[in-house]
Image (cartoon, coloured by chain):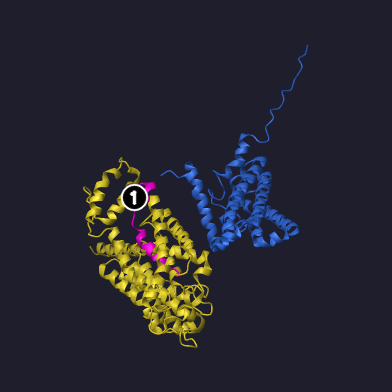
Chain colours: A blue, B yellow
Amino acid sequence: MSEVLVQPPAEKKPLLGKKERKLLTDPLSDNNPVTIQVLGICSSLAVTTQMKPTMVMAISVTAVVALSNWVISLMRNAIPSRIRIIVQLTVVSVLVILVDQMLKAYMYDVSKQLSVFVGLIITNCIVMGRLEAYAMGNKPYPSLLDGLGNGFGYGVVILTVAFFRELFGSGKVFGFKVIPDAIYEAGYVNNGLMMIPAGALFVVACYIWIQRSFAKHLEEKE
Amino acid sequence: MEFLKKKILELRPDFEKGGKYGQFHTLFDGFATFLFTPDRVSNGGAHIKAGIDLKRTMFFVILAMVPSLLFGIFNVGHQHFLALGEFAGSPLNGLWDKVFYGALKVLPIVVVSYSVGLGIEFFVASKKGHAINEGFLVSGMLIPLVLPPDIPLWMVGLATAFAVVFAKEVFGGTGMNVLNVALTARVFLFFAYPTFMSGDQVWISDKPDVYSGATALANAAATGTPFQISADQTWNYSLQDMVVGLIPGSIGETSKIAILLGAAFLVLTGIGSAVVMVSVILGALLMGLIFNGIGITPFMNMPFYLHLAMGGLLFGAVFMATDPVTAAHTETGKWIYGVLVGMLAVMIRVFNPAYPEGIMLAILFGNVMAPLIDYYVVQANIARRNKRLAARTSFA
């Protein structure tokens, strides 16, 4: 009697295991690209006067980070390390141009509002930072997740900043007036500081302050 | 006073740590030592003894500001009635009406500034368990003096809160701030609510729209002369008016005489640094002279000494640039700092029509640069002494 050879079923890896989930959620708070790694500050000051363009910016950056992470990770073993920055930049710029053309084709008004800042995604330190720190040394799928996570982390921060800037700076949220006229008649005035980049710096500072007062473990030990 | 003293001694045990109201210890201590010299003395360790502590220092600065405040109250009323065309002739006509009107406008600003600022100060002190600091006593008086009279009170409160939290508490409270607190409040309002802080419309309280209300600075920027000569001779001002202070402007900045009285008091009591005051003024005069030499625009050609008579340059030089925390600390550094602030103030005035008053931004810039200036002064001193040492040892 020959024994029936039964192939043990291959251990199926869950699509979103614990490790993968961590890749996605860590950048939202404890390893946030803006407030903890302090990357991408410039664009979070420049584009956050209103919610709508900020939303588009967040999505664009997420797409660029995730896809460039994925592509570079696929290529990582073929890239000579001396010219890796050039290769990374080429990939990123292709993706940025794609995003830019998409916006121009389908969301022309927002694309005008964002002006050069879409093109400047290429200089957003988060993109290069994640490529160097993660995609060059990890497999494609985790790299994609890492890119998505960091894009979301960036998006959370800039959307929060944009919410307060638009609310106090022009009394609106997503372009809808939320502060009633009665308050304006009582003497309230929109805060002009919120409309200039310096105001965004204060909002980001408050965000970091509040985040750190909740997450004590982030404080450097003396 | 005897009654208060008895009451305080009677209440004190309750407020000691572990007493009935122990959590309000800092609050009680703050008030008690504000009224009386405390009986506790330090023992052990090395202490520098001086007859004057932080509270008395701050109080002297407030005394120095009293002339500016009183004149400011009068001038708010004076400008108001002048614009309405009442009490023409001598400025002293209708003195009490003017003072009463001015007090109604100015005192609420003072009250709001103090209550918001001290409220935050007390809150932070009791939360951190620190003793209450008196640092805000001066800032709370400076803030009203650098604002226009018609500023809405909620803006004053917001700006004060912003300044106390962001310029002071986040850096560690009194004595640790990088920027002058009162100027931070002003710069917040200047950028957040520009229509309430600049232009021709804000400097005279409740004025009719036909009256221009341009400040001397605005006139100078537009025409090259600060003086105002109107067709019917009622809205004029001359150099004499500018020195006395009978011109539109922020509440405390207009009267140069009142400011100089305060300056003399500060210098005589040794509280304010004469070096800083003199060097800011010298810097402004120097830059004015340079512009006179270049002389391309009418504003550049304005006689250089007139810069001192208009706007808040003198007020800033006396009360704000001298802030012992934010100014440079070394004597050489104070000269560099002062000249830098003075030159920048005039430069901003002449070059940038969007910011008619340069002294605010110039002092804030100086504040940021002060630690760097001190660093290089100290390093230069070390290098010089090392060189001397090397020379001496090589001879021996």
Q: Mark 1 points at which residue?
A: B27
Question: In the image, is residue B136 part of the stretch drawn in magenta?
Answer: yes
Q: Is residue B230 left or right of residue A3?
A: left
| Residue B321 appearing in the image | no
Across and down, in percent, residue B234 comes to 45, 85
Label 1 lies in what chain? B
Residue B102 lies, with reference to residue B118, above or below; the image says below
Image quadrant in which the N terminus of chain B is located: bottom left
Residue B392, given in percent of the width and then of the height, sits at: 25, 64
B82 left or right of B332? right
Of residues A126 and B278, the one drawn nearer to the viewer in this rendering:
B278
**Left or right placement of residue A6 versus residue B36 in this view:** right
Q: Camera-side residue: A12 or A208?
A: A208
Would residue A216 be counted in the magenta stretch?
no
Please, what secondary structure does the residue beneath circle 1 have?
A: helix
Q: What stretch is highlighted in magenta?
A: B125-148
Q: How far across and how far down the image is residue B280, in percent?
A: 37, 73
Assign the C terminus of chain B to one quadrant of the image.
Answer: bottom left
> For this view, does B3 lie left or right of residue A110?
left
Measuring 45% from the left and 60% from the top, which residue is drawn there? B157
Amino acid type at mark 1: Leu
Q: Residues within 10 Å of mark 1 (few under 14, many from 20)?
A: some
**Residue at (44%, 78%) from the top-left corner?**
B81
Residue B308: image quadrant is bottom left
Q: Along the line of sight, which residue is nearer the eye, A183 or B191?
A: A183
Q: Residue furthest right?
A: A1
Residue A146 image position (x, y, % from top left): 62, 43
Answer whether residue B300 is visible to the viewer in this image.
yes
